[in-house]
Amino acid sequence: MRQKTPMRYPVRCSPARQSLPAACVLLGVFACQIFIAAGYVIPFPDLLLVSILLLFMAGLTYLVLYFTASRETRISETWGCGTKSQPAITEYTGHGFSEPIVTIFASVYRTKKSSTKVYSDKYNCLFAEGTAEIRLVAFFEEYIYRPIGTAAMKGASVVARMQNGCLDTYLLYVFIAVIGIIVFLGVVA
Amino acid sequence: MSADFALYCILNTVVVVLISPLFVSLVKKVKAWTQGRQGPSVFQTYYTLAKLLKKETIYSPHASWVSRVAPVACMAAILTASLFVPLVYVTEPYGGIGNIILFLYLLVVARFFMALLGLDAGSAFGGMGSSREMSVSAVIEPTTIVVFAALAFVFKSLNIFDMMAAAVSAGTLKTPILILLAISLFIILIVETSRIPVDNPETHLELTMIHEGMILEQSGKEPSRSWSSPRPSKQTLLMALLINPHRARGALQQRCLPQPSLPHLSSLCSRAAYSPLSSASLSPRWQRCGSSGCRVSS
């Protein structure tokens, strides 16, 4: 196996972006202590002990392996089914993670897949270019926002019909309201 | 932290690490018997682990620090989770230890690092394994949450220690609901430990492997591949969770319960040898709260 030095890719992350996950971790670990310091006693587990145990177990695992196992390491090419090296294009993308979920829950998401292929030979064997599209139903929009919006629009149209700008109609409303109040008071009395 | 709890932490971790490979071998042995073969020795996994520890570790040229850190982080998460499931004896829970939600989170942390590990080597197969593992997780995790929530509802506690103490003191199966929960937990156990029909730990065929795809690039001493890797340890923990709250006390009902303190360590060890997966003894707290079925030793 030929020796290779590992390729290093620069990771650029601003301090503000780094501080956010650090704050998440620290606030989670010291959550119990923070609430107690603020004067609130909330019955949730003390994560500080678990965090310390987590670090201890990590250190213990490392030390046990360091002293009991072989320390030899070697850099060797990733197995790629016969290809010489693994280009970045062979790596799984975010879509590779979401696609199985979309397929499994297709009945919920009502997935629609469509693709077009253009071949570069007359036998339609060599793929030249193409497009692929996955459409999902907007779950919250379709099942929550849209029914509420439709109901609001129907209610608004009823109110708009009542508020027609005609004085006679308003007098009729007042008349009906007065009759209703009289009947109500009569029944209650 | 009391000395009793510290002793519990040491004993429980050692027991999980030592017996987990044995259960892997036992599963292989039973599988061989069902296929009409003799199968490997029950100590074969120990021999394999000893061999792997002597081998060099090979990293991919594409691998970053994640490949060095993730196996240790994964193992640490599982070992910490092992403290949440009493295997030797039940003691007084301390801090957040024993919380069932935290237990699930630790298992998820381990799985997260395993998925990162699969991606880090730059192999398409590792990514494929990670993707499949996450997909299976997305399907099984709601079931896991519902089952654990039901366990918490049945035992009226979110703490696994309380559940196991209640199961021991109840004497019989607490409620028939536990039978249904045991069936669900068994399915979860199969999925979480990558067993047939969800996954096959023996396969290395690209089309079929899930968990093996993630650790395909792991070699030598890496914990994900070698010494008491997270999967056997997780299997032990889930088996304990399946067996302990769901079994009737049976023979244990008639046994005396020793004090889990340092002078009685030898008694605890012998009890652990008798039933390594059972919560065989109770702390004074549980003895006070126990039902009339409990008899406390002098």
Image: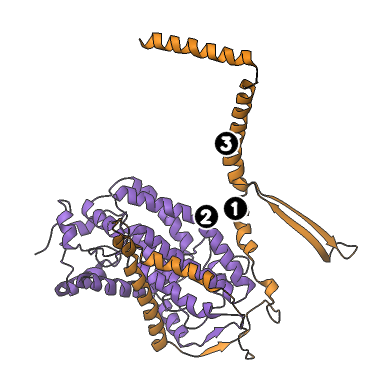
Chain colours: A orange, B purple
The disc label shown at residue A148, or none: 3
Residue B100 occupies quadrant: bottom left
Query: Answer yes or no: do the residues labelled 2 and 1 have beta carbons within 8 Å?
Result: yes
Residue at mark 2 to residue at mark 1: CA–CA distance: 8 Å
Indicate the position of residue B74 as horizontal and vertical percent values: 45, 72
Q: Chain of mark 2?
A: B
Tag 3 secondary structure: helix
Does B129 appear above or below B197? below
Residue B230, can we see it?
Answer: yes
In the displayed structure, does residue B126 sit left or right of residue B270? right
Indicate the position of residue B195 as horizontal and vertical percent values: 49, 63
Q: Amino acid at mark 2?
A: Val
Residue B106 occupies quadrant: bottom left
The disc label shown at residue B139, or none: 2
Residue at left 65%, top 21%? A164
Q: Chain of mark 3?
A: A
Which of the two labelled residues, at mark 1 and mark 3, occupies the earlier sequence position?
A: 1
Residue at mark 1 to residue at mark 3: CA–CA distance: 29 Å
Q: Chain of mark 1?
A: A
Q: Residues within 10 Å of mark 3 (few under 14, many from 20)?
A: few
Indicate the position of residue B214 as horizontal and vertical percent values: 55, 71
Q: Residues within 10 Å of mark 1 (few under 14, many from 20)?
A: some
Disc 2 and disc 3 on one polypeptide chain: no
Q: Which residue is mark 1?
A: A104
Report the label total: 3
